[in-house]
């Protein structure tokens, strides 16, 4: 089988012909940032928002952005021309490869840019219908979770907790409050009101999180952003996960105990329908474009 086409520093190449220096600071230090953008039938979902977040991540780590938003989108579209269907586009920018290993950030390095497009595996109808299991853990990550950094060891170890328990995600609590999950944002519903954790340095502000907020407004779903105590999560009527690959997904057990009725709740069903409508509009816009 031929290797899929990927992007490396401005060129499209088969994935197996891309070689990155072992001195690349992305490899040595996890000194880089990334994005994951879903594409439905070749149409990117909220590309500009993703690239604005990439810019924020780069600003946070003092990395000069090699491309404008329009250039990024053009590069991604060129890659997607080789990948029809629904795809998850992974974009990584590292600080580049200096001649030696030194924690101090060298001046004048050329960033390394890598992109690939993988099949987008959104939740199966069964997962949507039944909901998924989650476990919880202490949020042992660093204080800069708002940066979408490739230094993901904390997230990897957190996700492994759920993988080993046969669960879909690990919901994290810091000092008695909900932050997010290992690779998703988390929402709760109580008495018909959705609550989301604050947009601070303890979470990655998801593009899906922001979309949900908009959809809640359009669908007249009551919605608030505020600190959410662990006890509220454990007694919530509904818990949801969101991410670019999970869309919006109901959590029906937490640490082995049912969430609310133990089935995806009514507010989830409304939000899921709003999300699917939003996607369908994106596809029909693509059809006329
Ligand atoms: N993860 N929080 C964390 C820690 C994440 O890793 C992600 C996404 C999110 C949701 O962000 P968004 O809605 O923009 O996808 C929140 C991606 C999908 C990943 O690392 O694969």
Image (cartoon, rainbow, N blue to C red):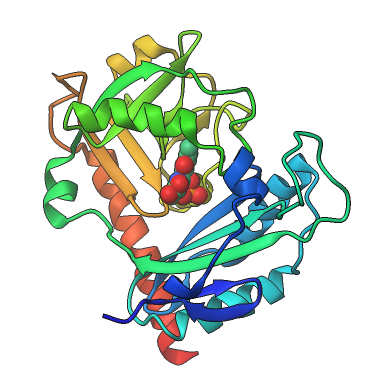
Furthest residue to the right? 107
In percent of width and height, residue 204 lies at 55, 38
Question: Which part of the image, by quadrant, shows the N terminus?
Answer: bottom left
> Residue pushed farthest front?
100
- In front: 203, or 273? 203
Asked whether the viewer can see residue 217, the reply is no
**Residue at 29% in and 49% down:** 270
The quadrant in which residue 187 appears is top left
Query: On the picture, is 249 further left or further right than 45?
Result: left
Q: Residue at x 46, y 19 (%)?
A: 139
Q: What x and y, as percent, mark residue 169?
A: 30, 33
- Comparing 20 with 197, the one in front is 20
Image vertical order of residue 100 relative to residue 230, above or below = below
Judged left or right of residue 136, residue 67 is right
Q: Is residue 231 left or right of residue 30?
A: left
Give the number of callouts.
0
Q: Position of residue 235 (x, y in %)?
A: 27, 15
Query: Which of 232 and 157 lies nearest the eye of the viewer?
Result: 157
| Residue at the far bottom in the pictured view | 288
Residue at 70% in and 75% down: 70
- Among the 4 quarters of the image, the one containing residue 249: top left
Can I make out residue 285 in this image? yes
Where residue 175 sits in the image (x, y, percent)? Answer: 50, 8
Is 110 or 57 nearer to us in this picture?
Answer: 110
Asked which quadrant contains residue 110, the reply is bottom right
């Amino acid at each position: 089988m031929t290797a899929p086409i990927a992007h490396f520093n401005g060129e499209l190449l088969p994935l197996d012909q891309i070689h990155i220096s072992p001195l690349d600071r992305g490899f040595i230090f996890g000194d880089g940032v990334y994005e994951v953008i879903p594409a439905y039938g070749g149409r990117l979902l909220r590309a500009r928002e993703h690239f604005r977040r990439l810019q924020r991540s780069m600003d946070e780590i003092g990395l000069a952005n090699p491309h404008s938003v329009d250039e990024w989108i053009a590069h991604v579209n060129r890659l997607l021309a080789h990948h029809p269907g629904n795809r998850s586009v992974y974009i990584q920018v590292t600080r580049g490869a200096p001649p030696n290993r030194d924690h101090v950030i060298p001046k004048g390095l050329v960033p390394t840019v890598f992109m690939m497009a993988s099949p987008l595996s959104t939740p199966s109808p069964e997962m949507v219908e039944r909901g998924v299991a989650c476990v919880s853990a202490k949020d042992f990550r660093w204080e800069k979770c708002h940066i979408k950094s490739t230094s993901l060891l904390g997230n990897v170890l957190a996700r492994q907790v759920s993988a080993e328990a046969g669960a879909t995600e690990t919901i994290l609590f810091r000092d008695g409050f909900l932050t997010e999950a290992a690779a998703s944002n988390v929402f709760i519903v109580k008495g018909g009101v959705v609550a989301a954790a604050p947009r601070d340095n303890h979470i990655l502000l998801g593009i899906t999180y922001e979309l949900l907020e908009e959809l809640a407004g359009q669908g007249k779903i009551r919605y608030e952003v505020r600190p959410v105590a662990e006890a509220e999560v454990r007694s919530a009527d509904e818990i949801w996960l969101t991410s670019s690959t999970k869309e919006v997904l109901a959590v029906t057990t937490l640490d082995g105990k049912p969430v609310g009725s133990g089935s995806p709740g009514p507010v989830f069903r409304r939000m899921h329908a709003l999300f699917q409508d939003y996607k369908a509009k994106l596809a029909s816009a693509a059809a006329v474009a």
